[in-house]
Image (tube, grey):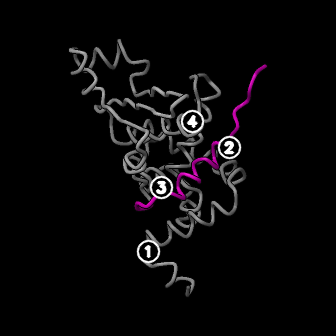
Amino acid sequence: MTRNPDYKRATNAAYTELQKYTGAYPVIDIFQIIENDSKISVKTYTQAAEQMGCTHNKFAYNIASSELGFSIIDCTTGKSLIFYNNLKCEETIRFVLAHELGHIRLGHCEDDKVSDSEANCFARNLLCPVPVIQEGKLTTPEEYMKSFCISAPMANIAVQYFGSDLYYARKDLIEYVRDRSYCSITGYSLREIYGY
């Protein structure tokens, strides 16, 4: 039986992740999110290549399952190892880490088109939260790129899927992230904003 991507689940998993996030907005610190999870380890392609006694390029283009990054997930223990190509640009690294975190949070034990679609949805919502887009009145890919430190392809997709991301996201999670992001960006506390 063919399974379709569950975009509602992937979208809300990203917002649930943002509920735990204590860093700044609008550029989400994906490294901080991952470092706060003791069950996830991270390794660069350079580190992996050194351990294997080969060059970075040999690891990235001949050994790794992707030139960008991949993860190994132990679905029985919940422990995971994310590998990423540290020679790629910052925007690519941020997306790769968010994508691999999506695989982990969504419990993917195999890599296929459906799980990749869900992980992409998770990454997009994690790195480009709808409330920040709304509050910043962002509408163009260029504005997304500048605000969120993402690549042009990701910005184009985030603009294209804004409506569906807003549709699938639970309203309580959206409002929570809206409050947290507004406080982060303005420097005001919820007490100062709402009087409590």
Q: Against 64, is 91 above or below?
A: below
Residue that numbered label 1 is attached to: 186
Label located before the other in sequence (2 or 4): 2
Q: Amino acid at mark 1?
A: Thr
Percent across and percent down for residue 23 are 40, 60
Look at the numbered disc 2 and give the secondary structure of its residue.
helix
Residue that numbered label 3 is attached to: 143
Give residue 119's mark: 4
Observer-nearest of 116 and 149: 116
Label 2, label 1: how far apart the Cα atoms are:
30 Å
Q: Amino acid at mark 3?
A: Glu
Q: Is residue 48 one of those drawn in magenta? A: no
Look at the numbered disc 4 and give the secondary structure of its residue.
helix
Q: Is residue 11 one of those drawn in magenta? A: yes
Observer-nearest of 181 and 108: 108
Give residue 9's mark: 2
Q: Which residues are magenta?
A: 1-25
Tally the marks: 4
